Image (spheres, rainbow, N blue to C red):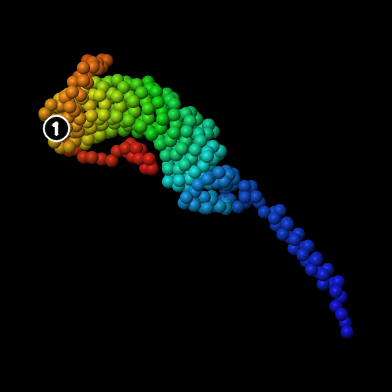
């Protein structure tokens, strides 16, 4: 009887095991680290370069209720939720991350520093309604293609982000509903912006005197703590300004005559301030105005008939002031529901202030400088006779007063 050699079987198994182990180790050594990707797996080297940036940022996210970051896997970055690819201006054959849109994702992270400033080809960054904290990195000044920056409705803090002043092609800046504080630097009103939304922060002190140097079409400074007068320089923005929101601040002084020179304005809202004096007759030159709100101030005198004759006026809010008279044209607007003069001192109209409140108010003199300008009308008035039919329209700036509203 022939017996198998017992030693031959164990030697074979040991040899096979060692060879298998060596093979596995070689595969592990050849596999790239997730943060050091194999560039051949990406359609463009620019995408390979930002891959570790995205993965590092992903690891800092502390809340992702919709599972957005679960799509941020693998080399096909153009399919990641929130990331959009295009060809950069300096190379139309290349593919890069051109836009990041996190609107409504409700992501939370302690900082954006080291993230958006690391996308050299970025043109658009939108992040409304998230929980990003920290400050805006000074490095964003190096984003030469960035033209829309929307960081609204987050938890960002600190002083006004000076770094945005150095972004060469920025046209839209939206940092509303954050916790920025301090002053607004005058140079921001000299930037070549189309849109500037700073509302619902903690900005304070006076509005810069160069406010009128701004070339923006839409300016929203509402719901802050700005003090002092509306700068008279605002007249210099007459060729561009379309909508202006100054409501719910601490602005003082008389309404400047120069506001009436804003010939392209469709919306002007300075309600809820500490403004006083009469409405200048120059407001009769606001031929395109649709919404005019000066409610909840300390204005007085007669409501100018030239204002009530404006043909496009759909809403004129003057409630909670101290006006004493209205003419026949204004009375017609009251009847039509266009003009609101509740809580004033107008004898003969319902829902006015108690007499004692009116008397107490007028015991304190509130004079205005340049009184001769108050009754001066710097435009043709032929349009009074044939007012256009008044129709209410959508006004973009009012959308900014909604915390989660995506305006653009």
Q: Which of 376 and 299 is in front in this view?
A: 299
The residue labelled by disc 1 is 350
Looking at this view, name the residue that lies furthest to the right: 1
- The local secondary structure at tag 1 comes to loop
Q: Residue at coordinates 16% horizontally, 24% vertically from top-left? A: 355
- Residue 195 x, y percent position in the rendering: 38, 34
Where's the N terminus, which quadrant?
Answer: bottom right
Q: Nearer the viewer, residue 164 or 402?
A: 402
Image label count = 1
Q: Nearer the viewer, residue 138 or 382?
A: 138
Determine whether, in the image, residue 4 is placed left or right of residue 92: right
Q: Residue at coordinates 53% horizontally, 45% vertically from top-left? A: 61
Residue 329, by quadrant, is: top left
Residue 21, by quadrant, is: bottom right
Determine whether, in the image, residue 218 is placed left or right of residue 187: left
Characterize the local packing of mark 1: few (<14), some (14-19) or many (20 or more) Cα atoms within 10 angstroms: few
- Residue 301 x, y percent position in the rendering: 19, 22
Q: Nearer the viewer, residue 127 or 340?
A: 340
* Residue 4, placed above or below residue 275: below
The answer to whether residue 295 is seen in the rendering is: yes
The answer to whether residue 216 is seen in the rendering is: no
- Residue 206 x, y percent position in the rendering: 38, 22
Q: Residue at coordinates 80% horizontally, 66% vertically from top-left? A: 14
């Amino acid at each position: 009887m022939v017996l198998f050699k017992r030693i031959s079987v164990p030697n074979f198994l040991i040899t096979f095991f060692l060879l298998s182990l060596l093979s596995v180790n070689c595969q592990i050594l050849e596999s790239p680290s997730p943060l050091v990707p194999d560039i051949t797996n990406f359609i463009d080297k620019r995408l390979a370069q930002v891959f570790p940036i995205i993965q590092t940022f992903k690891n800092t996210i502390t809340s992702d209720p919709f599972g957005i970051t679960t799509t941020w896997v693998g080399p096909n970055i153009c399919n990641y939720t929130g990331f959009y690819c295009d060809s950069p201006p300096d190379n139309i054959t290349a593919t890069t991350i051109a836009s990041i849109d996190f609107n409504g994702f409700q992501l939370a992270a302690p900082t954006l520093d080291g993230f958006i400033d690391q996308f050299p080809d970025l043109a658009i960054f939108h992040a409304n309604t998230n929980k990003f904290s920290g400050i805006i990195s000074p490095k964003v000044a190096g984003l030469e293609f960035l033209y829309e920056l929307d960081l609204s409705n987050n938890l960002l803090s600190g002083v006004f982000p000076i770094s945005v002043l150095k972004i060469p092609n920025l046209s839209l800046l939206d940092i509303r509903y954050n916790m920025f504080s301090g002053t607004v630097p005058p140079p921001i009103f000299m930037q070549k912006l189309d849109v500037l939304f700073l509302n619902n922060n903690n900005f304070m002190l006076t509005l810069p005197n160069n406010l009128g140097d701004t070339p923006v079409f839409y300016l929203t400074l509402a719901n802050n703590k700005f003090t002092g007068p509306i700068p008279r320089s605002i007249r210099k923005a007459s060729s561009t300004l379309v909508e202006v929101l100054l409501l719910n601040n601490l602005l003082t002084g008389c309404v400047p005559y120069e506001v009436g020179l804003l010939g392209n304005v469709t919306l002007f809202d300075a309600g809820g301030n500490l403004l006083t004096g009469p409405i200048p007759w120059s407001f009769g030159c606001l031929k395109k105005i649709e919404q005019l709100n000066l409610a909840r101030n300390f204005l007085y005198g007669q409501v100018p008939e030239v204002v009530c004759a404006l043909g496009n006026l759909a809403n004129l809010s003057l409630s909670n002031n101290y006006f004493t008279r209205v003419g026949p044209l204004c009375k017609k607007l009251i009847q039509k529901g266009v003009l609101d003069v509740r809580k004033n001192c107008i004898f003969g109209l319902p829902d006015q202030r108690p007499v004692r409140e009116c008397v107490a108010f007028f015991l304190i003199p509130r004079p205005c400088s340049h009184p001769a300008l108050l009754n001066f009308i710097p435009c043709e008035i032929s349009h009074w006779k044939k007012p256009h039919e008044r129709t209410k329209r959508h006004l973009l700036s009012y959308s900014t007063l909604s915390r989660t509203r995506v305006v653009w």
